[in-house]
Amino acid sequence: RLRSAPLTVRFVTNTTKESKRDLLDRLTGLGFDIAEHEIFTSLTAARNLLEQQQVRPLLLVDSKALPDFTGIGTDNPNAVVVGLAPEHFHYEMMNRAFR
């Protein structure tokens, strides 16, 4: 019914554990008729903000989420993006993030 209505359909999630592409694959595997441009995640919002502010982040995100940041410069970071990535929450990485 939504598809036939004069509405824009978006699937919104706050997940930071997987890329938009992985999420799309999982949803289509469950039978959803969905296109990648219809998915908006917190990683999408983070990427948009990074591009608007023109900053170089230290990405403390799961390795499955990294494809959503392809093309974003991360050399000499001046910002930090934090996602659900317990493997990154150790002394060395947290010290680097605080610096």
Image (cartoon, rainbow, N blue to C red):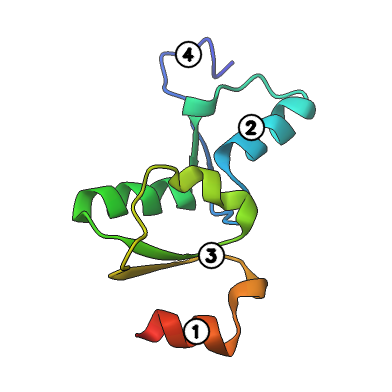
Q: Are marks 3 and 1 in contact (CB under 8 Å)?
A: no
Going from N to C along the chain, the mark reached first, 4 or 3, is: 4
Q: Nearer the viewer, residue 8 or 55?
A: 55
Q: Residue at x 37, y 49 (%)?
A: 47
Residue hosting label 3: 83
Going from N to C along the chain, the mark reached first, 3 or 2, is: 2
Measured in 3D between alpha carbons, the distance from the residue under mark 1 to the one under mark 4, in whole angstroms, is: 48 Å
Picture disc at residue 5? 4
Task: Tell me if mark 2 has few (under 14), some (14-19) or many (20+) residues whose alpha carbon lies within 10 angstroms of its own.
Answer: many
Query: Where does residue 41 sit, x and y in percent of width and height?
Result: 50, 46
Residue hosting label 1: 94
Picture disc at residue 24? 2
Measured in 3D between alpha carbons, the distance from the residue under mark 2 to the one under mark 1, in whole angstroms, is: 31 Å
Measured in 3D between alpha carbons, the distance from the residue under mark 4 to the one under mark 2, in whole angstroms, is: 22 Å
Going from N to C along the chain, the mark reached first, 2 or 1, is: 2
Circle 4: element type: loop
Residue 24, compared with residue 81, is above or below; it is above
Q: Amino acid at mark 3?
A: Gly
Q: Amino acid at mark 4?
A: Ala
Measured in 3D between alpha carbons, the distance from the residue under mark 3 to the one under mark 1, in whole angstroms, is: 13 Å
Residue ranking furthest to the left? 53
Q: Amino acid at mark 2?
A: Leu
Going from N to C along the chain, the mark reached first, 1 or 4, is: 4
Q: Residue at x 33, y 53 (%)?
A: 73
Going from N to C along the chain, the mark reached first, 4 or 2, is: 4
Circle 2: element type: helix
